[in-house]
Amino acid sequence: MTNRITELFGIETSTPTKINWGEIASIQHCPFLGRKCLKVRKSQPHISIGTCSVRYGKGNDSIIICPFRLQERNQIFTDCLHLLTLHEPGNQLHVVTEIAIPGGSVDYFLVSARNSKIVDFVGIELQTLDTTGTLWPARERFLQEKGLLTRSEDTISNKGFGINWKMTAKTTLIQLHHKIETFENINKQLVLVIQDRFLKYMRKEFRFDHLQPARLGDPMHIHAYALEPSTATSHLELKERISTDMKDISICLGMKATANVAVENIIRLLESKISHKTLFTL
């Protein structure tokens, strides 16, 4: 199977449906964020790359390479609602981005609040597979096939891309090791959202046999989603939930962050960020 882009700006590149790819490439809209795609060329920051997933190697399944692709329909946040054990009817739900904690920053917090005061929260990390090389020639060749580009240096380039399985997995587990201690100390949950193919790889390369089906009391949860094919746009489907604690994530690499932080410090940061703009609606 030839390595290729399988989704561009949220649309299947192999869809039999007639698509105006010229308009799609011009608008550069990300349907998962509801705004212009944030993946841009470093040399041309006004141009969004727009690649959501690719097909690489012998596998027939698409590999998600953009974390924003995981935000389809906000399903990943809905699937964490049960972890807000202190949430009650009448509370407001918020999604807050990028909160710093010992060990690094957390991508999102799903927050339950009442009268602008935090009642409960869960941390959510998104991780997709990193690529090596460059996707740009593959993107340009696809648009050329659709009659939108003429032969150019980019379309004939022999530069390709790869999937950085090992480094992505290793980096992810190290970061989890740093962060989970904070959540365990304050009796809260951290959820890692990944693709099922990525979880399968980590199970093969690391010791994952001690992880079990998700238990509400565990501080570390992993939600694995499959990218199911569809007519025009593939959709995410939750395939597996597992959980564990800090000692089972222990990987003694890198510097270990000090995690003796009071829950009040995180609550203070969250309360400073919640507003009508962060409200989460179903």
Image (cartoon, grey):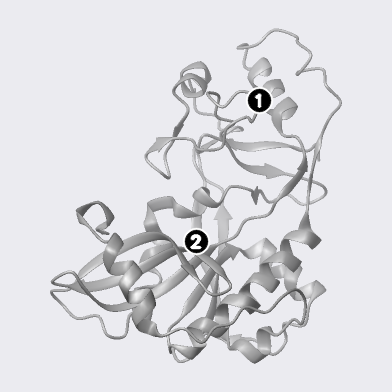
Q: Which residue is mark 1?
A: 43
Give x and y (percent) for residue 187.
43, 89
Horizontal placement of 150 versus 91: left or right? right
In terms of sequence position, does the residue under pointer 2 or pointer 1 come before the other?
1
Is residue 133 visible in the rendered image? The answer is: yes
236 is higher (above) or lower (below) than 176: above
Q: Quadrant of residue 140?
A: top right
- Say few, some or many: other residues with alpha carbon within 10 Å of mark 1 (under 14 / 14 to 19 / 20 or more): few
Quadrant (top left, top right, bottom left, bottom right) of the C terminus: bottom left
The kind of residue tagged 2 is Glu
Give x and y (percent) for residue 220.
54, 81
Horizontal placement of 32 versus 223: left or right? left
174 is higher (above) or lower (below) than 237: below
Give x and y (percent) for residue 105.
52, 65
Secondary structure beneath disc 1? loop
Horizontal placement of 75 versus 92: left or right? right
Q: Which residue is mark 2?
A: 237
Mark toward the viewer: 2 or 1:
1
Give the alpha-carbon distance from disc 2 to disc 1, as whole Å.
35 Å
Q: State the residue at coordinates (70%, 28%).
A: 136
- Say few, some or many: other residues with alpha carbon within 10 Å of mark 2 (under 14 / 14 to 19 / 20 or more): some
The kind of residue tagged 1 is Ser
